[in-house]
Image (spheres, coloured by chain):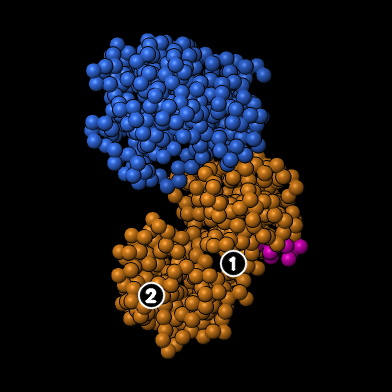
Chain colours: A orange, B blue
Amino acid sequence: MRIAHVAPLWESVPPQGYGAIESLVAELTAVQVADGHDVTVFASGDSKVAGNLHGVGTAALLADPDIREPEVYRMLQLQEVRDRAAEFDIVHSHVHSNTGCMAVPALRGLRTPVIHTVHCFFNKDNAQLFRRFAAERYIAISQDQRSRLPGLNYLGTVHHGVDPECFPFGTAADVTSPYLVFLGRIRPDKGVHVAIEAARRAGVPLRIAGRIKSCDRTYFEKRVEPYLDDRTVSFLGELDFAAKTSLLAGAAGTLMTSLIPEPFGMVPVESMACGTPVVSLRTGALPELVRDRVTGFLADDAYEMASAIHMLPAINRATCRQHVTSAFSIRRMADGYAAAYEFAARH
Amino acid sequence: MRIAHVAPLWESVPPQGYGAIESLVAELTAVQVADGHDVTVFASGDSKVAGNLHGVGTAALLADPDIREPEVYRMLQLQEVRDRAAEFDIVHSHVHSNTGCMAVPALRGLRTPVIHTVHCFFNKDNAQLFRRFAAERYIAISQDQRSRLPGLNYLGTVHHGVDPECFPFGTAADVTSPYLVFLGRIRPDKGVHVAIEAARRAGVPLRIAGRIKSCDRTYFEKRVEPYLDDRTVSFLGELDFAAKTSLLAGAAGTLMTSLIPEPFGMVPVESMACGTPVVSLRTGALPELVRDRVTGFLADDAYEMASAIHMLPAINRATCRQHVTSAFSIRRMADGYAAAYEFAARH
């Protein structure tokens, strides 16, 4: 098939820094090209993709300090997709928050079928837009996400996937001095403070890694920094892929404490791919990702999480990795999208 | 004619606070309704207009702290305009920066002719978008603006207008203790520091009024605050309409010191409507607004401005007001748009 991906423009594909959607587009494209498809990616001009690149602008928006109106590049990108739509059998749009939603009205009325993967949270603002355009074709990234805005024309749910081969497993967890991991943005709704409370209650050291935006500095100083002592709670900053997977692979467990309903979570999937079980609050898509008492534990608060941390040795690490291989592989994701493309092309 | 205005959504029409485009849409609508046109305004749901209101959302975006994705309301608005386009003879879109530009691609391909008044600065980002859609119908708000991005399908230039009756003239300037005025946002590119330098060189007190955004606080503290002493330079904060016009009417002159090419300037027009001459840097549209040595002076720097301030008594205040009545009245603006609508409807 001739496939066009419409990626976000904030980061390149794949991203230089953090960019979950840009990573996913890069990996999905690589599999689709390997499967023999003719894939074109509409992405920032500095992207490097397995298929054909249709560059928009010269650099990722985040990388260009001279850009005053980033929104117009999204508008130009969508027009360029329209201009070339007849060259493709399917247009696969990756909808993110804010200006990302513009793809939904902007890509209407093309002869080529358009599929929108909804990567963002639904909120009362964008829900109005999605409802207005309910008849467009959507892919949800979790059942939980989909249940929060029923009534859209969902072709299906396709969970994100990873390539398990990219994650180290042989590395057994450090059993002599076990530690827990929190990986993610350091901000209130990610619940780092809950992870700290659970780890301290359980008496197991916690290693925290992630980006702090300047607007979240006060949160960090008030709710995280007071607990840092390099023995019980430590902060490692933002890690690259190798350091991140090494940290995950060595951990006794990964704590997921998001206080808002995440539509998906790459960290728990990556953790399990390393064989590391997950102790998570029962929010958003997490119950779809973690098999309770099999690949980790679901809990309602920091107190329950602390109890679960003590039960982590009972989890079989090979089962965690197997769960990812069977349920969250990039292969499975690519097959899910292939089925959606076929359906869209026929209906 | 059946006219639809597409207003910004940040402020209501007319605005509660500062909102130049929203003010203009309110006044233009009032004149058009008085002229017998059937006018519908697509604006925030709390707007109050002379014609029919098509409300988008319940409140102005700036007034609703719960809004997380303001962009989607612009998208919804533009779709609602499309849905109702057949009910109108003309769609008059008011294009502002950032998401405001979305109107250009989003309103293409309608049977009803669409005219875009470009209220924003051109920059290297949005210029790409306007060039891509050069064939749409544009109205420039000054010759200077138009000269900065030639090649668009401009139907013409229509200067903004005011109702001179709304501005006090009888109030003679305070000749016993003359003062100068700077009115506008307190930020580097508006050149408040240049106005302070010119007034101090001339030895005439300067009264500064305007909003300070939090991001410009440092500029205010470094370049403005050190000169404040309530005698030579004073800061009055943000003023309402009555206080603003009273300040202008009592002044010996108004200083315009924008360091960037403003596509228009309401302050000099309002100042002249009060009979108060303008001393301005020769930037952007200012030479189109101020008649040099007739309604004020054009200068190249603070030094020249200081010399001009000494010549202010030579300017006839009645001539300043007459200039606004003949060249920048709301009537003249409405006639300019009526001609553009007629042209668009025929071609």
Q: Nearer the viewer, residue A273 or A233?
A: A233
Identify which amino acid the numbered label 2 is placed on. Ser
Give residue B184's quadrant in the image: top left
Q: Quadrant of the C terminus of chain B?
A: top right
Residue A46 in the figure: left or right of residue B241: right
**Side of B237 where A159 appears, left or right:** right
Q: Residue at x 39, y 34 (%)?
A: B194
Q: Judge left or right: residue A295 versus residue A7.
A: left
Residue A176 location (% of width, % of height): 42, 89
What element does badge 2 sit on?
strand
Q: Is residue B57 above or below residue A305?
A: above
Q: Is residue A263 above or below residue B140?
A: below
Pick whichever, B231 or A107, lies toward us.
B231
Residue furthest to the bottom in view is A176
**Which of the two marks, 2 or 1, is nearer to us in this view?**
2
Q: Quadrant of residue B278?
A: top left
Q: How crowded is the residue under tag 1: few (<14 C-alpha within 10 Å), some, or many (20+)?
A: many
The residue beneath circle 1 is A161
Q: Position of residue B275 (x, y in %)?
A: 36, 15
Q: Position of residue A316 (x, y in %)?
A: 50, 83
Q: Say whether residue B96 is left or right of residue A311.
A: right
Residue A121 in sight: yes
* Secondary structure of the residue carrying numbered label 1: loop
- Name the residue at 41% across, 80% down: A179
The amino acid at mark 1 is Gly
Mark 2 crowd level (few <14, some 14–19, many ≥20, 10 Å Cα)? some
At 64% from the left and 26% from the top, the residue drawn is B153
Magenta region, main secondary structure = helix
- Magenta span: A28-36
The verdict on a common chain for dots 2 and 1 is yes
A99 vs A173: above or below: above
